[in-house]
Image (spheres, rainbow, N blue to C red):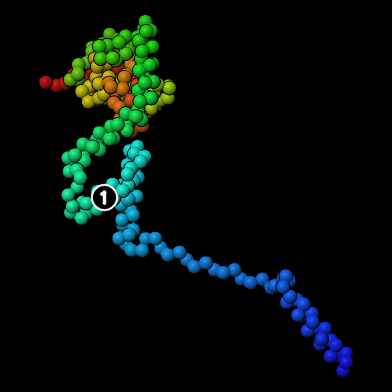
Amino acid sequence: MKKLILSVFVLITTISLCAQPGQTKPATKPAVPKPALPVLKTMNDSASYAVGVSVANFYKQQGVKKLNTVLVSRAINDILGNKKPLIDDAAANTVMNNYMTMLQAEKSKSVIEAGEKFLAQNKLRPEVKTTASGLQYEVLTEGSGEKPTAADSVTCHYRGTFLDGKGFDNSYDRGQPITFALGGVIPGWTEGLQLMSVGSKYKFYIPYKLGYGAFDYMTIPGGSMLTFEVELLEVRKKVQ
């Protein structure tokens, strides 16, 4: 009987010691965090935010990196609230055109300067001729056929490259020459091809003002000076 009481006492003492402070307790399950409340609670919230995303993405692609969002919000509230805006539609269009032109000018500045520097050096080469417009050309092969006028259409092969020599368009690679009206292409081509006779191959150095201008055009950065090797294959006279 005494042994039984002693065993019970030892068991109770052991349990008591295990429960003392500082001793390891059995692991407990971590608390599960409550899910955050949705930011966009209604369809109107979602549509409103989607409008902002659409507008911001559009102008970001146009080169706009910073806007006063307080004034953007005010303009939206003024228009949707039928309040008189600070500027009317005509003035807003003028402002945006001027602003986008300014941004493009800043973006194209280094490209324009690089092209102008190249042309200034290139014109010093004896084999390069420069017209009054600023077009530069080099005769690679002189043909003996007829010359086109601005009213005609022509068929030609060509290879277009940027200032760094990287190609951007090439009819030879496509295996098919191109036919087009001389009045429907960039000014540098309209002028340059009229200098050529059928069978000729020229190299044109076209300033951006005679090319695609200061604004980006597809894969051509705004302000790009372009080089074209052009082979005139045929002249199609305009039918009177």
The residue shown at (59%, 68%) is: 30
Does 197 appear above or below 67? above
Residue 197 seen anywhere in this rendered image of the structure = no
Outermost residue on the front side: it is 21
The residue shown at (85%, 90%) is: 4
Residue at numbered disc 1: 74
The residue shown at (26%, 23%) is: 186
Does 90 appear above or below 132? below
Q: Identify the amino acid type marked 1.
A: Arg
Q: How many marks?
A: 1
Q: Position of residue 152 (x, y in %)?
A: 19, 20
Left/right placement of residue 29 relative to residue 67 reads right
Residue closest to the eye, 145 or 114: 114
Residue closest to the eye, 28 or 208: 28
Residue 200 quadrant: top left
Residue closest to the eye, 104 or 118: 104
The residue shown at (37%, 60%) is: 40
Q: Position of residue 236 (x, y in %)?
A: 21, 20
Determine whether the residue tagged by mark 1 lies in a helix, strand or loop.
helix
Does 34 appear above or below 108? below
- Judge the density around disc 1: few (<14), some (14-19), many (≥20) Cα neighbours within 10 Å: few
Left/right placement of residue 102 relative to residue 94 reads right
Residue 205 seen anywhere in this rendered image of the structure = yes
Outermost residue on the left side: it is 240
For the C terminus, give its image quadrant. Answer: top left
Q: Position of residue 2 (x, y in %)?
A: 88, 92
Residue 141 quadrant: top left
Outermost residue on the top side: it is 126
Does 102 appear above or below 194? below
For the N terminus, give its image quadrant. Answer: bottom right
Q: Position of residue 232 (x, y in %)?
A: 29, 17
Residue 230 quadrant: top left
